[in-house]
Image (spheres, coloured by chain):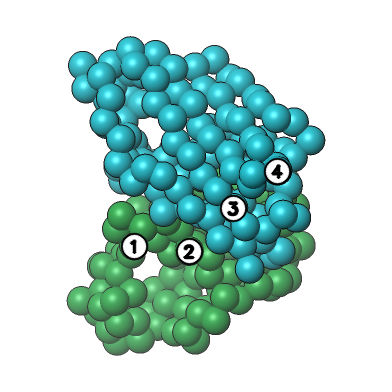
Chain colours: A cyan, B green
Amino acid sequence: GENVEQHPSTLSVQEGDSAVIKCTYSDSASNYFPWYKQELGKGPQLIIDIRSNVGEKKDQRIAVTLNKTAKHFSLHITETQPEDSAVYFCAAPAGTALIFGKGTTLSVSS
Amino acid sequence: DTEVTQTPKHLVMGMTNKKSLKCEQHMGHRAMYWYKQKAKKPPELMFVYSYEKLSINESVPSRFSPECPNSSLLNLHLHALQPEDSALYLCASSQVEFTDTQYFGPGTRLTVL
């Protein structure tokens, strides 16, 4: 079955720096890769997703890249702000399930 | 509107109680999900309803009983829970199963005493 690995587990950056979180997946049939942001006490919120027919997608300060050959995808946040501090989860579908990575706790200090 | 609502926000129950969690969406989505999330862990899938029929039960103990009364509502009935069932219970919905965007509710924080 699908296995999703996410790194790093924690990431601390200064405000204005960039942050990169990487995920690898095992099921070559997977074709949809969402990223979720979860703030304390809240449910996960979709921030960006990518489908396997594109290599990169951007939305303002957030971008996701996908390398299907290597089976990995990454979240890039530029010009980080304190409100970007949260736990970020990548995910990939595996048959009838959506498998989440273990999460990355991002801390942005001002 | 991409809102999924869940009630109650917090729930404390004893091991002999019966309670229910409720979830509602008005986006016309035909797939709805229950996830369980323990602290500092990712969400774990419990149940999936597709077109109001249970399509996936991820080997969840029978003390958790899902119900989908109509296409907008999803309930999770709880009975004889254990302290280790304390967690954040998340509801999500999507247009179709899985390969479509899932929208999550804020969750119900459950504590079993």
Q: How crowded is mark 3: few (under 14 residues within 10 Å), some or many (20 or more)?
A: many
Q: Amino acid under label 1?
A: Lys
* Labels 2 and 4 touching (C-beta < 8 A): no
Vertical order, B3 against A108 (above or below): below
Q: Position of residue A38 (x, y in %)?
A: 40, 41
Q: Which mark is residue B44?
A: 2
* Pointer 1 residue: B38
Task: State yes or no: discs 2 and 1 in contact (Cβ < 8 Å).
Answer: yes
Q: Which mark is residue A25?
A: 3
Residue A89 in sight here: yes
Q: On the rendered image, what quadrant is the N terminus of chain B found in?
A: top right
Callout 2 secondary element: strand
What is the three-letter code of the residue carrying label 3?
A: Tyr
Amino acid bearing label 2: Glu
Q: Are marks 1 and 3 in contact (CB under 8 Å)?
A: no
Q: Do discs 3 and 4 belong to a common subunit?
A: yes
Residue B72, percent across and down? 65, 54
- Say yes or no: labels 2 and 4 on the same chain: no
Query: Considering only order in the chain, which callout, 4 or 3, is on the residue closer to the N terminus?
Result: 3
Q: Which comes before the other along the chain, label 2 or label 1?
A: 1
Q: Is label 3 or label 4 in front?
A: 4
Question: Is there one chain holding both mark 2 and mark 1?
Answer: yes
Query: Mark 4 is on which residue type?
Result: Thr
* Of residues A70 and B109, the one drawn nearer to the viewer in this rendering: A70
The chain to which mark 1 is attached is B
Residue A34 appears at what percent x and percent y?
59, 41
